[in-house]
Image (spheres, grey):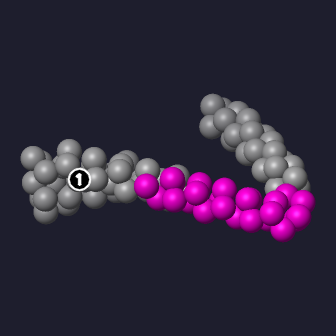
Amino acid sequence: MSIALFISGAEIFFILFIVVMVFGADKLPGIAKSLGKGMRQLKDATEDIKQEIQRSAEKQGIDTSFAEDIKNEIDEVKRNVTDVSGTIKRK
């Protein structure tokens, strides 16, 4: 997501043009499907690792409630930044 902030429309168009030239237009849907599956598997694996760490910490008697508090604070900061940046972008 953060990478997309640094790529302009012309650069995206150029990258897509190169991809079409290298792989051909008929293979693009398959490539996109494979990338989507790979990203989903990565997300699932990350979630599994996170849950395993959480279970292990709870089994050892480690208090992990602070992690949820930190996540909530980060989400609040993200919302505040989005509110401010949304106002700036509109003006």
Looking at the image, is 91 positioned above or below residue 6?
above
Looking at the rendered structure, the secondary structure element under dot 1 is helix
The image quadrant of residue 22 is: bottom left
Q: Which three-letter amino acid code belongs to the residue tagged 1?
A: Ile
Q: Is residue 67 left or right of residue 21?
A: right
> Does residue 5 show up?
no
For image coordinates 36% across by 49% down, the residue present is 36
Looking at the image, is 13 positioned above or below residue 42?
above
Which contiguous range is marked in magenta?
A: 41-64
Q: Is residue 52 left or right of residue 23?
A: right
Looking at the image, is 62 positioned above or below residue 12?
below
Return the residue at label 1. 31
Q: Of residues 28 and 62, which is closer to you in this image? A: 62
For image coordinates 82% across by 49% down, the residue present is 68
For image coordinates 47% across by 58% down, the residue present is 42
Q: How far across and down, in percent of the image, does residue 62 sit?
A: 88, 65
Q: Of residues 77 and 62, which is closer to you in this image? A: 62
The image quadrant of residue 19 is: bottom left
Looking at the image, is 24 positioned above or below residue 59?
above
